[in-house]
Image: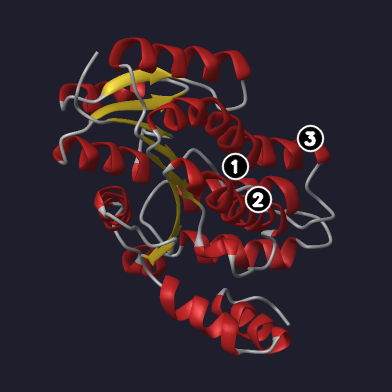
């Protein structure tokens, strides 16, 4: 058991999750970094993060992970639902099996883990659930329908949960990253080409994949530390904001989405990725 606050961070093996786990360690938390492959958590373990094998699509894995954290520390004060990936491809092309997996990882995994953690937070009448969505939970990009669908869904679920959990002293915070320099873009581009290269949407797929891998675009992206800093602010604030939008392009694009009519925003996004028109 420990008197230090305890945090559980999913998707901690790289990128935003890794940076967030290190930020919370620096803030004095006991941090469990969860990932499917614990061999990728060795560097974090050397910095004091406790590695935890967890697959957010496997209920038994999540149950055993939460049970272990509670058994060792007696508490979970912060849950950061960060695990996720981008499955891009034309809506017509992406197989239903892959579409379901995208929702299983990005939505149902986060919600199920939250269900398992909430009773422990309610018992202490305190806690913070941090859901890492994306600016893609408010805007849309070509060939990203399934991915955006998961992020829009997690935004709505977070809003409902915030109202439900507040009487128990639990805060629910949404983090909306913009362009962040991680493995995400390359993985999304790979999924896009696998789904839509060579078919009716191949010209669009080539343009969007090239934009994702563009060296100029990658250079403009923000480091994962900006998201970790936002999480740090949220979990240490007496009254955290409901949303933190940060990282390359997040605030300007969200503002433009509110201001522009749908077709004007469509045209702007198409131009931004060099989409043939």
Q: Name the residue under label 3.
A: 97
Residue 168: give x, y in percent of width and height.
47, 40
Residue 232: give x, y in percent of width and height.
26, 50
Residue 99: give x, y in percent of width and height.
75, 42
Image quadrant where one finds the C terminus: bottom right
Q: Which is more N-terminal, label 2 or label 1?
A: 1
Query: Is 60 located above or below residue 194 in the figure?
Result: above
- Quadrant of the rendered image containing residue 20: top left
Residue at 56% x, 53% y: name it. 163
Q: Is residue 126 left or right of residue 254?
A: left
Q: Do the residues labelled 2 and 3 touch (CB within 8 Å)?
A: no
Of labels 2 and 3, the one closer to you: 2
Of labels 3 and 1, the one closer to you: 1
Q: Are marks 1 and 2 in contact (CB under 8 Å)?
A: yes
Q: Name the residue under label 2.
A: 150
Query: Is 276 located above or below residue 141 in the figure?
Result: below
Residue at 68% x, 41% y: name it. 103
Q: Nearer the viewer, residue 77 or 58?
A: 77
Could you tell me how far apart the alpha carbons at marks 3 and 1 are, in whole angstroms?
14 Å
- Quadrant of the rendered image containing residue 27: top left
Query: Is 102 located above or below residue 242 in the figure?
Result: above
Q: Going by the picture, which residue comes out furthest to the front?
A: 167
Could you tell me how far apart the alpha carbons at marks 2 and 3 are, in whole angstroms?
15 Å
Mark 1 lies on a secondary structure that is: helix
Q: Which of 128 and 218 is in front in this view?
A: 128
């Amino acid at each position: 058991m420990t008197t230090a606050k305890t945090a559980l961070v999913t998707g901690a093996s790289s990128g935003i999750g890794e940076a967030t786990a290190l930020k919370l360690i620096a803030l004095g938390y006991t941090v469990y970094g969860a990932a499917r492959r614990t061999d990728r958590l060795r560097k974090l373990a050397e910095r004091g993060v406790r590695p935890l094998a967890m697959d957010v699509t496997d209920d038994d894995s999540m149950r055993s992970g939460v049970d272990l954290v509670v058994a060792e520390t007696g508490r979970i004060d912060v849950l950061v639902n960060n695990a996720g990936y981008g499955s891009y491809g034309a809506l017509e092309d992406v197989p239903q099996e892959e579409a379901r997996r995208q929702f299983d990882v990005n939505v149902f995994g986060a919600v199920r883990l939250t269900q398992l953690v909430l009773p422990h937070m309610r018992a202490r009448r305190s806690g913070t659930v941090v859901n890492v969505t994306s600016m893609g939970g408010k805007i849309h990009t070509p060939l990203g329908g399934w991915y955006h669908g998961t992020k829009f869904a997690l935004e709505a679920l977070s809003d409902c949960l915030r109202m439900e959990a507040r009487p128990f002293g639990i805060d629910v915070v949404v983090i909306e990253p913009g362009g962040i320099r991680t493995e995400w873009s390359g993985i999304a581009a790979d999924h896009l080409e696998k789904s839509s290269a060579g078919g009716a949407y191949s010209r669009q797929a080539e343009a969007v994949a090239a934009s994702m891998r563009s060296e100029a675009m990658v250079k403009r992206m923000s480091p994962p530390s900006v998201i970790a800093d936002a999480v740090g602010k949220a979990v240490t604030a007496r009254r955290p904001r409901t949303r933190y939008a940060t990282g390359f392009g997040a605030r300007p694009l969200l503002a433009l989405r509110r201001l522009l009519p749908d077709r004007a925003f469509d045209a702007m996004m198409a131009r931004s990725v060099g989409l043939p028109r």
